[in-house]
Image (cartoon, helix red, strand yellow):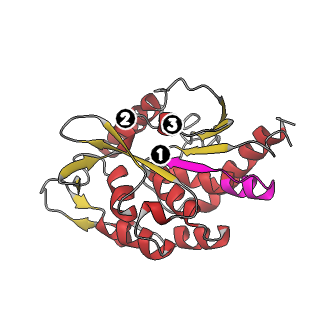
Amino acid sequence: MWLANKKIGLVLGGGASLALAHFGVLKALEERGLKPSVVAGVRAGAVGAAFYSSGISYSAMCDITKLVSWYKIITPAFMRPGLAKLNKLADIIEQSTNTEQIEDLKIPLRIVTTNLLTGEPHVHNKGRLGLIASASCSIPGLFAPVIIDGEPHVDGGLSGNLPIYALKEDELDVVIAVDPLKYCHLYKNPTTFYRVVLQAFVISLKTSSTIFCNIDRKVIKIEPKVGLVDPFDLNVFDLLEPLGYEEAGRVLDSLD
């Protein structure tokens, strides 16, 4: 395989539950003996990247993910300053990976958040793993900001939903970037309040996926054909994992 002797960087984009397709991509990489030297993630992609970088088995990652529910990862915040907090998610990440600090992971990890005071992206390569990963998932208004080094951090996807730029300083031959939103379908007639809000959310995610950083290495994009799936439905692992696996296999095998 062309990638066999290459130094690979892996980028996992956001997409709420659509990011479950990442697990199929990870399976395809594992089967082909491809091991990234560094991983970057944003939003739900940051959670998957944290699991993968910890070195826990693929089956363990799947088992943990299938047990996740909104009840298990959020607590009410009563509008101070969001509807909910993701502190339970932070605990699950650290407990499942048996890791507290990003710098202690087996594979180097970069997680992107957005500084709410400056509007600038922050690429984290050290610090509390669960805290920073949950901050990357914290959609403003819906989830309360997470305080990191004394300043509020939120949704890393605001700074680009496919943060290839997070690996700009790493010495790599190729970057594999996984975008679970490229082929996410929109409702043809979003007439309910929920579907209007959901449609706007998906559009914002798809738009931010186009933010791209020019880097001096080849980028291979994997874009699972997820179709019309509710990004807030956490019970779609068995639907999305095979779609990620199929598309990753197609793309990777075409490189030979």
Amino acid at dot 3? Glu
Location of residue 81 with respect to 72 vertically, above or below: above
Give how far across and how far down residue 163 sits, in percent: 48, 37
Q: Position of residue 133 (x, y in %)?
A: 39, 57
Mark 2 falls on what kind of element?
helix
The answer to whether residue 155 is above or below residue 26 is above
What amino acid type should be assigned to the residue bearing mark 1? Gly
Give the residue at mark 2: 159
Label 3: which secondary element: loop
Write the residue at 49% across / 53% down: 17
Among the 4 quarters of the image, the one containing residue 88? bottom left
Q: Answer yes or no: is residue 72 visible.
A: yes
User: Residue at the location (62% across, 43% down)?
Assistant: 9
Question: Mark 2 vs mark 3: which is more N-terminal?
Answer: 2
Label 2 to label 3: alpha-carbon separation: 17 Å
* Left or right: residue 160 compared with residue 8: left
Residue 111 disc label: none
**Is residue 35 covered in magenta?**
yes
Label placed on residue 15: 1
How packed is label 1: few (under 14 Cα within 10 Å), some, or many (20 or more)? Answer: many
Please give the label number shown on residue 169: 3
Res 157 quadrant in image: top left
Q: Secondary structure at mark 1?
A: loop
Q: Nearer the viewer, mark 1 or mark 2?
A: 2
Residue 200 can be seen in this image? no
Estimate the x, y position of residue 238 in percent, counting from the top left.
63, 61
Label whose residue precedes the other's in the sequence (1 or 2): 1
Q: In the image, what residue occupies the spot 82% across and 35% down?
A: 255
- Which stretch did the figure color magenta? 26-40
Position of 33 compared to 207: left or right? right
Q: CA distance from mark 1 to mark 3?
A: 25 Å
